[in-house]
Image: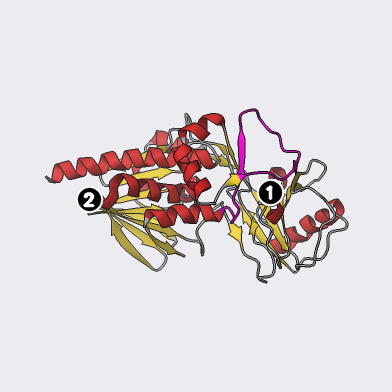
Amino acid sequence: MSRVLIVGAGLTGSLCAYVLKKVLQSKAQFVVWDKARGAGGRMSTSRPPDPTSHSADLGAQYITATAAYTQSHSNFYTELLSAGLLKSLDCHIEGLQHKEGNKNYVTPLGTSSVVKHFLSESGADLYLEYHVTGLHRCGASWKVERKGGNEKFDAVVLTIPVPQILQLQGDLGNLLSVQQREQLESVRYSSRFAIALFFSPDVVFSFSWGARYVTDSHCIRYIAVDNKKRSSDAPGLGPSLVVHTSVPFGLEHLENDKDAIQPIILQELQRLLPDLPQPVSIKFQKWRYSQVLTSVPNCPGHMTILEQPLLICGGDAFTHSNFDGCVESALSVCRALQFSLDIKQNISL
């Protein structure tokens, strides 16, 4: 049985594991590694330190699907809707630009619940705090180095941000063609900061909106009452507020410390919402790779670095930076992987 490693427990990685399990069944064993302490990647939901507040989505806020993707990816949407992990966005979002034919969804249990669902349904072995540092070709397999050890796999799928792929040690750099390297180095990401503020159960906000796009701030671009956005108010839990900075502010201060940035954002938030009560706790997040601004040319869905042993790169950098882009990449990766494993089985017969 082939052992397949998927590096990255974000949306694309979880979808790859999910689709591959459906397609290949027992023909392969799937393992997922992620350097973080929890699955989700940029679909990150943070629990408050004090359990008396609602959780908060620090990454992706909601899912927007075009009519075409709602149809072509209907199986994914139907499954998530049936499981209660997705529902229509009903709250008022100030400044949201709605395009005809688009449909907006929210995740009642937080965006990370979508990733965790696909990982659970895949049956893949998930290992967190496994930080991959290098890839070494060993005959018909890969020796994958991580902080604290290494293992061998028959195929490797990299779904981490492209700059992190290019930083991997070992044989990867020598295997990239000149064109592939140029394509990967052309990928550009936006960067931003996010802050979650958690409040006590007795707090009631004076504003009526569930979320708001801000146009008159030097640093804040988006604010959401996260539990209201998700329509998931629970008795006895205080509200949570999420703040996302603008892309220019994120880029300008990307290398600055949290202690220097957080006060600036909170001061600006106080200016925008002067009646905001004091939170019980605050969580700060730096998204160095927030959204893809420039993807790999022609959006191929994946990039095959080596066919034997198989090494594939996937993720929103090879499509576009949203839910459907990750689905498209995962399907593309899985087609390539299925083809490769079928060839390998035919050769061994």
Residue 316 image point, x, y percent:
50, 41
Figure quadrant of residue 3: bottom left
Q: Residue furthest left?
A: 349
Magenta stretch contains residue 270: no
Residue drawn at (41%, 33%) of the image: 179
Q: Residue furthest bottom?
A: 50
User: Residue at label 1?
Assistant: 250
Q: Nearer the viewer, residue 126 or 142?
A: 126
In the visual, does 255 lie left or right of 4? right
Magenta stretch contains residue 105: yes
Identify the disc placed on residue 296.
Answer: none
Residue drawn at (69%, 61%) of the image: 258
The N terminus sits in image quarter? bottom left
Does residue 36 appear anywhere in the picture?
yes
What type is the residue that disc 1 sits on?
Gly
Q: Secondary structure at mark 1?
A: helix
Residue 74 image point, x, y percent:
47, 37
Residue drawn at (44%, 61%) of the image: 131
Q: Secondary structure at mark 2?
A: loop
In the visual, does 111 lie left or right of 208? left
Extent of the magenta region: 88-111
Q: Is residue 300 above or below residue 233?
A: above
In whole angstroms, how far apart are the C-alphas of marks 2 and 1? 43 Å
Q: Nearer the viewer, residue 231 or 288?
A: 231
Does residue 184 appear anywhere in the picture?
no
Identify the disc placed on residue 140.
Answer: 2
> Reading the chain from its start, which is encountered first: label 2 or label 1?
2
